Image (cartoon, rainbow, N blue to C red):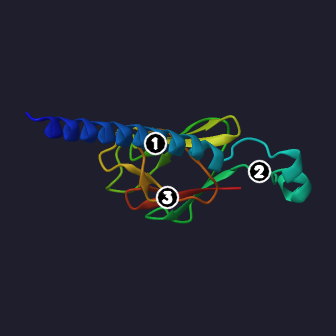
């Protein structure tokens, strides 16, 4: 190999190394910038002075009843207490669904603190919270539809 070829290879390798270093630095800057853009936690005193609405969150309404919005039991309401609600076709379910697409023990709605959560109990057709299929227990907000087969239920104040 002559001297010119060796020099060109060395220069090419050096350029490649710098490209790698710059790409690593750019990736690190992107990762660090994500935390800056997405603020979490309480607003600062300056932000509260500029916008007093940030000082206190609005009072949170609690779910007091379960309402069947669509399906064979449409219009059915059930008061919510402190105990979990079993949903399904089985007779031991708290809310017995007359729905061919629901499993015997389809899903469970349970309170935790001041919130309610829904979890699928290994049903055949799945449980959907606002058009997203559940893969684990998820918190349920007021008036967000929960679909089990052809039945749609919501938590109401």
Give the image location of residue 22, x and y in percent. 43, 42
**Residue occupying image coordinates x 17% and y 35%:** 6
Mark found first going from the N terminus, 3 or 2:
2
Categorize mark 2 by other alpha carbons within 10 Å: few (<14), some (14-19), many (20+).
few
Residue bearing the label numbered 2: 60
**Cα separation between marks 1 and 3:** 34 Å
**How many numbered dots are placed on residues in this image?**
3
Q: Secondary structure at mark 3?
A: loop
Categorize mark 1 by other alpha carbons within 10 Å: few (<14), some (14-19), many (20+).
few
**Cα separation between marks 2 and 1:** 40 Å
Q: Residue furthest left?
A: 1
Query: Can residue 18 be seen by looking at this rendering?
Result: yes
Q: Nearer the viewer, residue 91 or 111?
A: 111
Q: Secondary structure at mark 1?
A: helix
Quarter where residue 83 is shown: top right
Give the image location of residue 8, x and y in percent. 21, 41
Residue bearing the label numbered 1: 27
Categorize mark 3 by other alpha carbons within 10 Å: few (<14), some (14-19), many (20+).
some
Mark found first going from the N terminus, 2 or 1:
1
**Cα separation between marks 3 and 2:** 20 Å
Q: Secondary structure at mark 2?
A: loop
2 and 1 marks in contact (CB < 8 Å): no
Quarter where residue 136 is shown: top left
Give the image location of residue 141, x and y in percent. 62, 52
Is residue 47 rendered to the left or right of residue 96? right
Circle on res. 130: 3
Mark found first going from the N terminus, 1 or 3:
1
**Residue occupying image coordinates x 83% and y 54%:** 54
């Amino acid at each position: 190999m002559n001297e010119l070829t060796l020099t060109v290879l060395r220069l090419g390798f050096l350029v490649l190394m710098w490209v790698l270093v710059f790409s690593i630095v750019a990736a690190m800057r992107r990762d660090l910038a994500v935390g800056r853009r997405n603020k979490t936690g309480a607003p600062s005193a300056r932000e509260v002075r500029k916008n007093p609405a940030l000082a206190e969150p609005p009072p949170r309404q609690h779910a007091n009843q379960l309402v069947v919005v669509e399906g064979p039991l449409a219009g059915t309401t059930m008061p919510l207490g402190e105990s979990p609600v079993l949903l399904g076709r089985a007779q031991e379910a708290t809310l017995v669904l007359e729905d061919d697409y629901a499993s015997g023990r389809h899903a469970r709605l349970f309170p935790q603190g001041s919130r309610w959560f829904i979890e699928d109990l290994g049903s055949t057709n799945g449980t959907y919270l606002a058009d997203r299929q559940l893969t684990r227990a998820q918190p349920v907000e007021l008036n967000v539809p929960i679909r089990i087969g052809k039945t749609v239920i919501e938590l109401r104040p």
